[in-house]
Image (cartoon, rainbow, N blue to C red):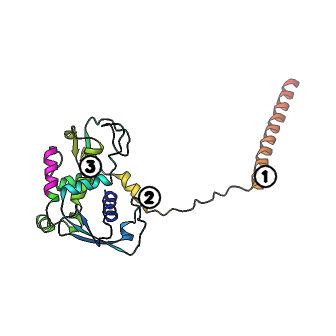
Amino acid sequence: MNQALKKLQAHLHKTAGTSSVISHPCYPKGYILSVTLAELYNSPCVEKPSNFISNATATFSGTGNSSLCLSSFGNIVNVSSCAFSSDCGFNGVYQPPVNGEFFAFAAYFHIFNFLGLTPKAQLTRVLSTIDTHCNKDLSTLVVENPSISVVTLKDYCASAHYIMTILLKGYKFNNTWDQISFVKQIADTDIGWTLGYMLNLTNIIPSEQPGVVTGVLRSQWAAQTFFIVFVLFLSLLLIAILAFFIITLSAAQ
């Protein structure tokens, strides 16, 4: 989720041209965020522009435009290059129709729980609720949610539209929306996106030159092999001699 929001920031920055203040349709009106380009492009998920200057600053100004926020995700989530008609998900990859019951958890649950849409809600209500939230200005959101920090509040709109883009345009849940439940627990057990957390951590680990595996020297290997073979030979020889004496004694008796 965080990487999708960062990709949206990067897209808005690249398409803003030389403007010093960048309009962000997903941020509430009245919210201002300034970040250095080093912070903005510090992820492998975003490609640096050709004129990248690490200490330059990008300033985002929220406009609180729900419809424009939703359409902006069409620029970072590739759902248009489908060659298989409706049976297509992302990047032109075949996506069979979804069937059965589905559980949405982790960030999906927390976003929808904040919006009061858990565990289930009609699709029309979901869309209208997201629109209503996204069109509110910062002061209204702060008054309505005094216990939530502004840093967290600013991302609910973008996160909700990203989720809807994935579920409706990617996985085609338009006609099967009632099959999704947004939950925190299944059978009284907390569930979470551990794989995503692991992948996120691997992005933080710096790449290193693989260590050289040092084996046994050729001379040592030859000596050890000779010793083992010699011991096996002596063992077999002793067994043969012992067997010979036993047979000889038996014949003499």
Task: Identify the secondary structure beneath mark 1.
Answer: helix
Q: Crowding near pointer 2: few (<14 within 10 Å), some, many (20+)?
A: few
Residue identified by numbered label 1: 223
The single residue placed furthest to the bottom in the displayed view is 55
Residue identified by numbered label 3: 165
Q: Say left or right for 41 vs 125.
A: right
Q: Main secondary structure of the magenta part?
A: helix
84 versus 78 height, above or below: above
Total label count?
3
User: What amino acid does circle 1 point to?
Assistant: Ala
Residue name at image x 22 percent, y 38 percent = 176
Q: Which residues are magenta?
A: 119-132
- In reply to whether residue 242 is colored magenta, the answer given is no
Give the number of the mark in front: 2 or 1.
2
Q: Position of residue 9 (x, y in %)?
A: 31, 63
Q: Is residue 159 visible?
A: yes
Give the number of the mark in front: 2 or 3.
3
Q: Crowding near pointer 1: few (<14 within 10 Å), some, many (20+)?
A: few
Image quadrant in which you'd find residue 43? bottom left
Q: Crowding near pointer 3: few (<14 within 10 Å), some, many (20+)?
A: some
Q: CA distance from mark 2 to mark 1?
A: 43 Å
Residue name at image x 44 percent, y 58 percent = 202
Image quadrant in which you'd find residue 215? bottom right
N-terminal-most mark, 3 or 1: 3
User: What amino acid does circle 3 point to?
Assistant: Thr
Q: Say left or right for 10 vs 230.
A: left
Please give the label number shown on residue 202: 2
1 versus 32 height, above or below: above
Q: Disc 2, disc 1: CB below 8 Å?
A: no
Q: CA distance from mark 3 to mark 1?
A: 67 Å
Q: Position of residue 230 (x, y in %)?
A: 80, 45
10 versus 186 height, above or below: below
